[in-house]
Amino acid sequence: MVHAPSRPTPGLPPVRVNLYSDTQTRPTQAMKAAMLEAEVGDEQAGLDPTIDALCDRMAALLGKEAAIFLPSGTMCNQVAILTHCRPGDAVLAHRTAHILTAEGGGAAALTGAQIMPLEGEGGQYTADTLLAAFNGGSRYDMPQTLVEVEQTANLGGGTVWPLAALNAVADLAHARGIATHMDGARLMNAVVAAGVPAHEMAAGYDSVWLDFTKGLGAPLGAVLCGSAAFIDRAWRWKQRLGGSLRQGGICAAACLYALDHNIDRLADDHDNARVLARGLAQIPGLAVQSPQTNLVFFDTTGTGRNASDIAGALRQLGVMVSVMGTYRGRACTHLDVTRAQVDEAVAAMQQVLAA
Ligand SMILES: *Cc1c(COP(=O)(O)O)cnc(C)c1O
């Protein structure tokens, strides 16, 4: 992944349409007002009522006994792996999983765990693929202790795991005594797209988390959920990693605000993504993956130009997209992108590829 700055860059026009990521949203005045009014206390000492309220609400939403507030989604994944696994253990995950491609080798560096990459279309693998990857559990084998899925699968195209597939994978893992973890960075996008409640999607998973900075508009925060015993053990890792906070309720208030105001509207982002994909697909040479949620992936091979060349030309026109591979780009809709801006982005792409 190539990371682009959103600050004013000398020699470049201002960003008019930011399709770079749903992480680039800015908190609104109303969200900031909720933050200012938050009742707060020392979270490390268990005294922040707003964080407690958020955790209670998230445990109920995801159908788990308990929850823990963490600064970021990456910390949710790493705390979960630390809590589930021991050094030398293996985590089975899709080869494009965020834990494998975008967390700095955290599972190896922190837990001493290795990740076994699984193949499959759209960032998902089947129960059969998982079954074939299980080892015999002999003393020669690495202990396989965790199975991970990503809902939605980011690099797979923002795809939604069907409920039956989630359950098939979880059942297979549990039948072998293997724990299950759901990276739910964009879980609510999946919930809104599929019309399946979050607690049903997460039912087969021993741990699951939601990111508040992926299209939900909060400046920071993610909540990891699981059994009361799991969350107790996760707290030790939160403390060790320096993730225990003080008056963190000021941030949890933004997350509560997001739960109240920014979930249902994810459907607008999905509509905008479909409009964007249809517009881009009309342009000769571009191959567009049909979006299931708010991520639109396109392949530039047929244009004869690579993705970073095209992204650079778009940026000259004030439109920012991200580069995910030599010929693969991603445009992401979110609450700071309007339908008019989607149209502007399509027009900019037409102009770039007509040149
Ligand atoms: C963004 C993302 C993460 C990490 O979340 P941060 O809040 O950026 O640390 C993990 N998994 C997936 C699928 C993501 O898209």
Image (tube, rainbow, N blue to C red):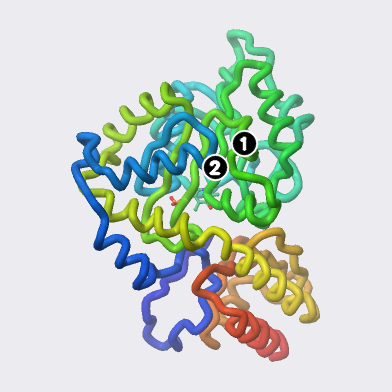
Name the residue that disc number 1 marks. Answer: 93
* Left or right placement of residue 41 versus residue 295 in this view: left
Label 2: how many Cα within 10 Å (few below 14, some 14–19, many 20+) = many
| Residue 243 image offset from top left, x and y in percent | 29, 41
Q: Which residue is found at the position 64% from the left and 51% from the top?
A: 190
Q: Amino acid at mark 2?
A: Asp
Front position in the image: 230 or 130 = 230
Distance (Cα) linking label 2 and label 1: 10 Å
Label 1: how many Cα within 10 Å (few below 14, some 14–19, many 20+) = many
Q: Check disc 1 and report its element: helix, strand or loop.
A: strand
Above or below for 251 versus 294: above
Q: Is mark 2 within 8 Å of ligand 1?
A: yes
Residue 192: numbered disc? none
Above or below for 132 versus 208: above
Q: Quadrant of the C terminus?
A: bottom right
Which is nearer the N-term, disc 2 or disc 1? 1
Closer to the camera: disc 2 or disc 1? 2
Q: Is residue 315 visible?
A: no
Front position in the image: 325 or 51 = 51
Q: Which residue is found at the position 19% from the left and 45% from the top?
A: 41
Q: Check disc 2 and report its element: helix, strand or loop.
A: strand
Above or below for 312 versus 241: below
Q: Amino acid at mark 1?
A: Ala
Q: Which residue is found at the position 67% from the left and 82% from the top?
A: 346
Q: Is residue 183 visible?
A: yes
Front position in the image: 136 or 232 = 232
| Residue 112 image offset from top left, x and y in percent | 44, 27
Name the residue that disc number 2 marks. Answer: 183
* Left or right placement of residue 281 versus residue 53 in this view: right
| Residue 275 image offset from top left, x and y in percent | 71, 75
| Residue 257 image offset from top left, x and y in percent | 40, 59
